[in-house]
Amino acid sequence: MNNEKFDSANYPRAMSELSALKRGTSDTPVYFKVEIIVSFLKNHSLNVAWVEANPSLSRMITSGFFKTSNLESIFDAGRNSKSFLKEYEAYISNQILEN
């Protein structure tokens, strides 16, 4: 995975989870939305300031309401490739912010 580029087409299950996550969080406040989602998927951790700024999204993301195991496993598999992870995070961010 060291030289691999992130391509969403290679991960249909994860993209399905991301789509559900995007739909399910579309009405939540935008404050730290991307940071909360990416940080939780990547490390299962959230910054206290983010939680305070957006408690409803934080609860939703950490409650297990959304199935995210495939999204999380891509982060786990890509831990040794900074460029891959950067592309993956950028992709998630763009999807979440897109209307």
Image (cartoon, rainbow, N blue to C red):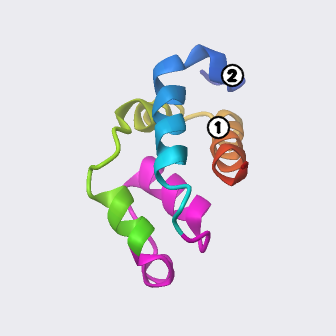
**Quadrant in which the N terminus appears:** top right
| Numbered disc 1: secondary structure | helix
Which residue: 40% across, 72% down?
56
Q: Secondary structure at mark 2?
A: loop
Q: Is residue 4 above or below residue 43?
A: above
Q: Position of residue 25 (x, y in %)?
A: 50, 55
Cα separation, mark 1 vs mark 2, equals 8 Å
Taking the magenta stretch, the answer to whether it contains residue 43 is: yes
* Left or right: 66, with 23 as reference point: left
Range covered by the magenta-colored residues? 29-55
Q: Residues within 10 Å of mark 2 (few under 14, many from 20)?
A: few
Compare residues 86 and 69 and report the one nearer the observer. 69
Q: Which residue is mark 2?
A: 7
Mark 1 or mark 2: whose residue is earlier in sequence: 2
> Which residue corresponds to the image point at 41% horizontal and 32% vertical from the top-left?
73
- Is 49 magenta? The answer is yes
Relative to the observer, which residue lies in front, 31 or 44? 31
Q: Which mark is residue 9?
A: none
Q: x, y percentage for residue 97?
A: 69, 54
Asked if residue 38 lies left or right of residue 3, the reply is left
In this rendering, the count of numbered labels is 2
Residue under pointer 1: 88
Q: Identity of the amino acid at label 2? A: Asp
Residue at left 44%, top 66%?
57
Q: Position of residue 54 (x, y in %)?
A: 48, 76
Q: Residue 60, image x and y in percent?
A: 35, 60
Kindly tell me whether residue 79 is visible in this rendering: no
What residue appears at the point 54 percent right and 32 percent down from the top-left corner? 78
Binning the other alpha carbons within 10 Å of mark 1 as few (below 14), some (14 to 19) or many (20 upward) gives many
Q: Quadrant of residue 35?
A: bottom right
